[in-house]
Image (tube, rainbow, N blue to C red):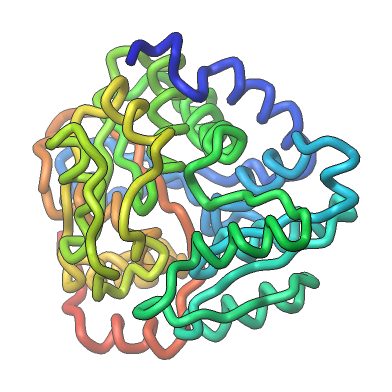
Amino acid sequence: MTATTLAVNYADIDAAARRLEGVAHRTPVLTSRQADDISGAQLFFKCENYQRVGAFKFRGAYNAISCLSDQQKQRGVVAFSSGNHAQGMALAARMLGVKVTIVMPSDAPAMKLAATREYGAEVILYDRQQEDREVIAARLGQERGLAVIPAYDHADVIAGQGTVVKELIEEVGPLDYLFVCTGGGGLLSGSAIAAAHWSPGCVVIGVEPEAGNDAQRSLRSGQIVHIEVPATIADGAQTQHIGKLVLPILQAHVHDIVTVSDDQLRAQIRFFAERMKMVVEGAGALAAAAVMNKVVDVAGKKVGVIVSGGNIDMALFAECMARSAPVRG
């Protein structure tokens, strides 16, 4: 499939940026001398942990709901998510005056469940080990006439996520490498399209947890690979497969997908807290962990690193601090 026939193109991202202007936060790009010393590269961290709801997901959610017809907005929407897309959808729907129902796993982090409800969403819980959230959402959509807006396999969601990298490269200029946290692939897809437009020579690398490398296996095999729910502290990346719209975009614009361990994520979470004074969740630390652990050699290069979210349960945060060694550089 050629770039011209992909589900999303750069014009879609540009249109999403106009819808999000003055609504989504233009999140900061931070640097760290120690991170540069450890990696041997010049790193630019795009900090979506400072986005509304604490994650990039607000961008795609707001853009997708904005693109619905007035009739569909009156009926409402349904989504399924372990937490960040849930919160993004709940807040975006409230801002746009749309009723939203969210299908969430019963073991989702308590803070994400609470926040989703506080934003006004109806939350329906399911057992992620026994039930299929996509089937539940589809049934609700049919029974109630709701528009289904999945977390990543949706053109308007992907376009909204692509605004992250549009902002990053607008601010810091062309990049040699871009590392992107990867779960279902919506952020990676949108980021790769934006990078191809703004920095054509940029090598785009997705990063997954070792326990859940379905996107890596899908990209390398050329077909969508389904896996069991992965056991990882990166709860935002506990997806079982990437989207149908996602794979062709990855094939067109992504160089590779690599993985990091949970121990590397714990150490990265600690680094962010101690050295950069940031709270970052497991999935949000994926891209940085790959760069800081030199999974890919980026010495001497200009590197963009997406920090995708900061919604970590405080008990898990404390565990990460206790079970990891401080990063030295």
Does the rendering let one see residue 302? no
Q: Is residue 145 above or below residue 296?
A: below
Q: Quadrant of residue 255?
A: top left
Which x, y percent locates residue 169? 47, 26
Residue, far front: 143
In this picture, residue 312 sits left or right of residue 295: right
Which x, y percent locates residue 115? 67, 76
- Nearest the camera: 323 or 180? 180
In this picture, residue 294 sits left or right of residue 109: left
- Nearest the camera: 184 or 144? 144
Q: Quadrant of residue 155?
A: top right
The residue depicted at 65 percent of the width and 82 percent of the height is 114
Which x, y percent locates residue 278? 46, 65
- Nearest the camera: 52 or 247? 247
The residue depicted at 37 percent of the width and 88 percent of the height is 318
Which x, y percent locates residue 327? 19, 67
Does the rendering let one see residue 149? yes
State the quadrant of the C terminus. bottom left
Q: How many marks?
A: 0
The residue depicted at 31 percent of the width and 59 percent of the height is 240
- Nearest the camera: 15 or 251? 251
State the quadrant of the N terminus. top left
